[in-house]
Amino acid sequence: MLLKSIMVVIFLATSSLALEKEEISSTMKSRIESTIDIISQKELSIDEKTKKIFPLFDQIFDYQLMTKLSLGKMNWSQMTTKQREEFSKIFILHLKKAYLVKISLYTDEKLNIVKLKEINKKRVWLLTELVGSSDTYDITYKFYKSKNRGWLIYDVDIMGISLIKIYKVQFNNLLQNESYEMLLEKIRVK
C-alpha cells in the first residue's frame, strides 16, 4: 500500500511538471524575462546568477536528447556506456554555460513571442524575438512531445543558426581526426 501511494505521488509530481502545448508561450516568456532580470542584477556574481537561472529551464530542456543529437547517431552508437555518461555530463554543463553566455548578451532587450508554429503533432517551434534599441534577434525554441515529460526543448536556433547543428559539425570534424578523449578535453576547456 505504501509503495502504491509513493508511486501515485511520484506520478502526480512529475506530471504536474510536464509542460503542455498551450503553456509553452506563456511559460517561456515568463522564464526568459526572469532570466533577463537575473542577468541584469549587477550585484549578483556569475555563480549566483547561474544558480537562479538553470532551475528555470532544467525541466523544459531535454539535455540528454540534445547531447545525442549533437554527436550524431553514428558517433553516439560507437561510444561505450561510460563514455556516453561522461560526455553527457560534460556537454550538458557546456550547453548550460553557452546558453547563459548567449542570453546574457541580451540584457536590455524586450522579448516578443511571435507565434507557436506547429510542425507536426509531436513538434512545435516557439518563434520569439529579442528587440533592442537598434537590433532584433530571432530566436526559435524547438520543442518535441516527450512520452512522460510533456513538451521539451531539443534545439535552439539563434538568428537562424541551430546550436545542435553547429555542435554536430564541430564534433564530426573533430572525431574524424582526433580521439574521443580530445573531444572531451576541448569541451572542458570551453
Image (cartoon, grey):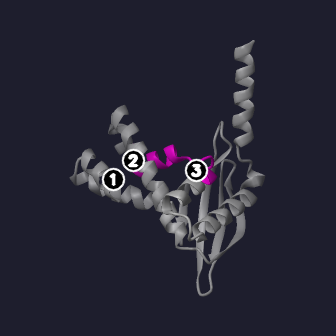
Q: Let me know if residue 69 is in the magenta part.
A: yes
Seen from the viewer's position, the closer of residues 94 and 22 is: 94
Instruction: Tell me the element at label 2.
Output: helix
Q: Which residues are magenta?
A: 55-73
Label 2 – label 3 distance at C-alpha: 16 Å
Q: Residue at x 71, y 68 (%)?
A: 113
Q: Earlier in the sequence, mark 1 or mark 3?
A: 3
Relative horizontal placement of residue 36, taking residue 85 as reference (left or right): right
**Amino acid carrying mark 3 in the image:** Phe
Label 1 – label 3 distance at C-alpha: 21 Å
Q: Residue at x 62, y 46 (%)?
A: 59
User: Do the CB atoms of the residues marked 2 and 1 lie less than 8 Å apart?
Assistant: yes
Find disc 2 in the rendering and name its residue: 90
Find disc 3 in the rendering and name its residue: 61
Residue 115: x and y, percent?
72, 66
Rendered view: 85 above or below 163: above
**Amino acid carrying mark 2 in the image:** Ile
Q: Residue at x 39, y 49 (%)?
A: 71
Residue 98: x and y, percent?
46, 61
Residue 129: x and y, percent?
64, 73
Rendered view: 51 above or below 80: below
Rendered view: 152 above or below 113: above
Q: How many numbered dots are placed on residues in this image?
A: 3
User: Do the CB atoms of the residues marked 1 and 3 lie less than 8 Å apart?
Assistant: no
Relative horizontal placement of residue 26, taking residue 96 as reference (left or right): right
Q: Main secondary structure of the magenta part?
A: helix
Find disc 1 in the rendering and name its residue: 188
Label 2 – label 1 distance at C-alpha: 7 Å
